[in-house]
Image (cartoon, grey):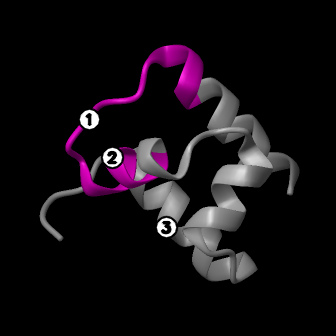
Amino acid sequence: MSDLNNLAKAIIHFQERTSMSDAQFAFSSHFSVERIHDLKSGEKQATPEETDKLMKFMNSN
């Protein structure tokens, strides 16, 4: 992985801490697995709304 953005790093750290797979994380956060993969790989940028929703999810779990 190259230079990841802060959201991608936060997702990866959260998954490591909670032992959640991409599928579990996607289901729990109400995102598609494909979208989570795009965000973690840095191929696509999250919208401000997506960032807010994911950060709220991770901070509350």
Position in image of residue 50 (x %, y %): 56, 25
Give the residue at x 42% y 59%: 9
Figure quadrant of residue 53: top right
**Which residue sits furthest right?**
60
- Give the Cα separation between the discs numbered 1 and 2: 5 Å
For mark 3, what is the residue?
12
Kind of element beneath mark 2: helix
Q: Is 10 left or right of 1, judged from the image as shown?
A: right
- Residue 48 on the magenta segment: yes
Placement of the N terminus among the 4 image quadrants: bottom left
- Which amino acid, mark 1? Lys
Q: Is residue 56 above or below residue 8?
A: above
- Above or below residue 43? Residue 49 is above
To which quarter of the image does residue 25 belong? Answer: bottom right
Question: Which of the two labelled residues, at mark 1 and mark 3, occupies the earlier sequence position?
Answer: 3
For the residues bearing labels 3 and 2, Cβ distance under 8 angstroms: no
Asked if the residue at tag 2 contacts the one at tag 1, i.e. Cβ–Cβ closer than 8 Å, the answer is yes
Who comes first in sequence, dot 1 or dot 2?
Answer: 2
Quadrant of residue 22 in the image?
Answer: bottom right
Q: Is residue 46 magenta?
A: yes
User: Which mark, residue 38?
Assistant: 2
Stretch of the chain drawn in magenta = 36-51
Magenta highlight: main SS? helix
SS of the residue under disc 1: loop
Percent of width and height locating residue 33: 52, 52
**Residue drawn at x 62%, y 64% as measured from the top left:** 23
Identify residue type, mark 2.
Asp
Residue marked by disc 1: 44
Question: What is the spatial separation of the Cα atoms under label 3 and label 2, in whole angstroms?
Answer: 13 Å
